[in-house]
């Protein structure tokens, strides 16, 4: 007899279009990739690989999937972003020349002009993937939590309309219990991936981990997955154990 739940899962798998993350090992634990057009939070403490993950997601899309990508850096200049990625075997400048990648550092003036800028730039290169870092700086447009939260929801609707698969990056401070500085970014997104470094049992060193905390429409693993950063970027190892 056909198990109705299994049937339902199978159907949902076919209905939801997926975009490959570009992170070797990750797609197999999230049913093939991020739901196309979804808004996901990539959270972690400093040095856990968030920026690298974000750029690798765009690089993979631009180079292998014919999906141009836009990197919105609210803090660093594009040249600084590129410099940080120099260590990896990625020809980002070549992709920029081909209009398959764009890195911008918009002025933080008005939220409305920020939204317009995103739309224009997405339009210019036909972006299908978007990264915003750090997402929490959006709150700089507003002087209260209510408006910030509402604006994040506005942004979510805009992203949905534009059809871009999106990663927004949030810094977690040491010892924080939330996934983002304001503590509510995680509620407006449809997926949350947490990167971390955790101390080995013998306290000799730290190991990198990735964890899918939430992903709507996805039967994802809840495993703490070992992760590495090397010359080709990030890879995760779902079949291995952290300890
Ligand atoms: N080529 C490389 N090989 C191995 N590890 C690297 C390489 N380049 C960077 N890293 C590691 O990646 C870390 C930075 O990752 P990054 O994506 O900038 O983190 P975050 O954005 O979370 O602060 C560095 O601290 C270093 O440990
Ligand atoms: Mg970073």
Image (cartoon, grey):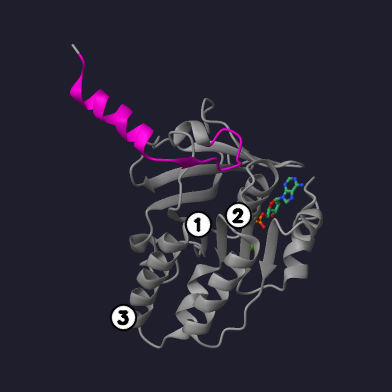
Check whether the beta carbons of the residues at disc 3 and disc 2 lie within 8 A of each other.
Answer: no
Secondary structure under tag 3 reads helix
User: In the rendered view, does 92 fall on the left or right side of 21?
Assistant: right
Residues shaded magenta: 2-26
- Asked if the beta carbon under badge 3 is closer than 8 A to the nearest atom of ligand 2, the reply is no
Mark 2 surroundings: few (<14), some (14-19) or many (≥20) residues within 10 A: many
Q: Is tag 3's residue or tag 1's residue first in the polypeptide sequence?
A: 3
For image coordinates 35% across by 67% down, the residue present is 184
Along the viewing direction, whichever of 89 and 209 lies nearer the viewer: 89
Q: Which residue is mark 3?
A: 146
For image coordinates 64% across by 46% down, the residue present is 66
Quadrant of res 89: top right
For image coordinates 62% across by 78% down, the residue present is 106
Q: Of tags 1 and 2, which is closer to the observer? A: 1
- Quadrant position of the N terminus in the picture: top left
Evaluate whether residue 167 shows in this view.
yes
Q: CA distance from mark 3 to mark 1?
A: 25 Å
Q: Which residue is mark 1?
A: 164
Secondary structure under tag 1 reads loop
Provide residue 40's location: percent of width, then percent of height: 45, 55
Secondary structure under tag 2 reads helix
Considering only vertical position in the picture, is 107 above or below 224? below
Mark 1 surroundings: few (<14), some (14-19) or many (≥20) residues within 10 A: many
For image coordinates 59% across by 43% down, the residue present is 208
Provide residue 222's location: percent of width, then percent of height: 39, 37
Q: CA distance from mark 1 to mark 2?
A: 14 Å
Q: Is residue 235 magenta?
A: no
Q: Which residue is mark 2?
A: 54
- Asked if the beta carbon under badge 2 is closer than 8 A to the nearest atom of ligand 1, the reply is yes
Provide residue 36's location: percent of width, then percent of height: 46, 47
Q: Is residue 16 magenta?
A: yes
């Amino acid at each position: 007899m056909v198990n109705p739940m299994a049937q339902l899962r199978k159907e949902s798998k076919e209905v939801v279009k997926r975009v490959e993350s570009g992170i070797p090992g990750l797609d197999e634990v999230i049913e093939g990739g991020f739901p196309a057009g979804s808004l996901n939070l990539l959270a972690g403490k400093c040095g856990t690989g968030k920026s690298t993950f974000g750029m690798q997601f765009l690089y993979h899309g631009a180079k292998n999937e014919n999906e141009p990508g836009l990197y919105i850096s609210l803090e660093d200049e594009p040249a600084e972003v590129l410099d940080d990625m120099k260590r990896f075997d990625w020809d980002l400048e070549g992709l920029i020349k081909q209009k398959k990648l764009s890195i911008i550092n918009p002025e933080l003036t008005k939220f409305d002009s920020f939204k317009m800028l995103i739309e224009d730039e997405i339009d210019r290169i036909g972006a299908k993937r978007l990264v915003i870092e750090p997402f929490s700086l959006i709150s700089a447009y507003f002087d209260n939590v209510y408006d910030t939260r509402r604006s994040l929801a506005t942004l979510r609707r805009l992203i949905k309309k534009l059809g871009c698969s999106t990663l927004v990056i949030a810094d977690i401070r040491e010892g924080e219990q939330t996934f983002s500085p304001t503590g509510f970014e995680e509620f407006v997104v449809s997926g949350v991936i947490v990167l971390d470094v955790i101390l080995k049992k013998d306290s000799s060193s730290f190991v990198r981990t990735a964890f899918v905390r939430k992903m709507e429409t996805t039967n994802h693993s809840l495993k703490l997955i070992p992760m590495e950063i090397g010359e080709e970027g990030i890879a995760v190892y779902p079949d291995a154990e952290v300890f």
